[in-house]
Amino acid sequence: MNKNLRKAVIAGNWKMNKTPAEAKELIRAIAPLVKDAGCDVVACTPFVDLQAALEAAAGTNIEIGAENCHWEKSGAFTGEISAEMLVSMGIKYVIIGHSERRQYFGETDETVQKRTRAALDAGMTVILCVGEYLEQREQGITSELVALQTKVALGGVSKEELKNIIIAYEPVWAIGTGKTATADQANEVCKLIRDVVAELYGKESADAMTVQYGGSMNAANADELLSKPDVDGGLIGGASLKAEDFAAIVKAASK
Ligand code: PEP
């Protein structure tokens, strides 16, 4: 597998943090630090921050993404936001299936598939999250579980559409816990995801697919994680809220 065949993507997941004014401030602080990045840089923000983030990112190399979208275009879905709505305001990226959505908001592999379908239909790039709980790792079922999540989410996705999908391997036990998967553990599962993609779409598509690692990636461990052959970037939670830390990870991915 050749890492040069694909572009590294570093995406921040701001979760439920920052007001619009703070979002503007953070994007303005990040922009000069990542202007020469050798990778794609994305900041996924709460819905209410998207407009402010877009304005602050105008003319920079930072793309703005959302943290979720609904599978219907419009309708009686109180509290939800559709992919069409996001696209209409200029949003190109969306995170789907984050473990916090699965854990706290009843997201299932099936709803992840539906949301992925809707985002692709709207022309968005999806950052699709998969990953196991600690008990599942301890039971030795990480591979089966991650393969299943990947296969269900990609159900109905064509080879052409796959170009608009980034898969983020996020072991749930490493998210927001300060516990990072070792670089070898991260690489092993990222490779497994690539093998699943190869099985479904062929080697060429798998080689071209960006597979990120996410889970307490920070300025100190990014170099080692990103040096692994199957780790093509990162989905960054906590460290994406500090301009210097996020920029250091972008720098590590640009090497
Ligand atoms: C995430 O929210 O996707 C994430 C990886 O969080 P953290 O970096 O804080 O573990």
Image: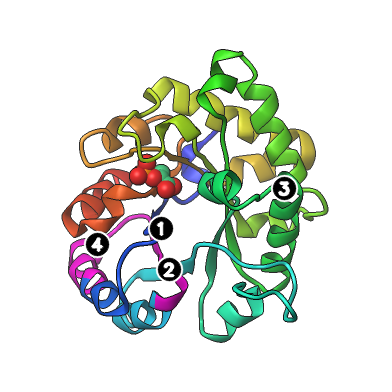
In the drawing, what numbered circle is on residue 15? 1
Residue mark closest to the camera, 3 vs 1: 1
User: Is disc 4 surrounded by few (<14), some (14 to 19) or many (20+) residues within 10 Å?
Assistant: many
Q: CA distance from mark 4 to mark 2?
A: 21 Å
> Under tag 3, what secondary structure?
helix
Q: CA distance from mark 2 to mark 1?
A: 6 Å
Is 231 displayed left or right of 125 in the figure? left
Whether pointer 2 and pointer 3 mark residues with C-beta atoms closer than 8 Å, the reply is no
Q: Quadrant of ligand 1?
A: top left
Q: Which residue is mark 2?
A: 46
User: Mark 3 or mark 2, which is nearer the start of the sequence?
Assistant: 2
Can residue 197 be seen here? The reply is: no
Corner quadrant of residue 141: top right
Is 242 displayed left or right of 140 in the figure? left
User: Mark 2 or mark 4, which is nearer the start of the sequence?
Assistant: 4
Can residue 10 be seen here? The reply is: yes
User: Mark 3 or mark 4, which is nearer the start of the sequence?
Assistant: 4
Q: Nearer the viewer, residue 28 or 238?
A: 238
User: Mark 1 or mark 2, which is nearer the start of the sequence?
Assistant: 1
Residue mark closest to the camera, 4 vs 2: 2
Under mark 1, the amino acid is Lys
In the drawing, what numbered circle is on residue 153? 3
Q: Position of residue 245 (x, y in %)?
A: 20, 50
Q: Which residues are magenta?
A: 26-48
Q: Is residue 209 above or below residue 241?
A: above
Q: Nearer the viewer, residue 126 or 206?
A: 126
Under mark 2, the amino acid is Pro
Q: Residue at x 33, y 46 (%)?
A: 253
In the drawing, what numbered circle is on residue 34? 4
Is 33 displayed left or right of 115 in the figure? left
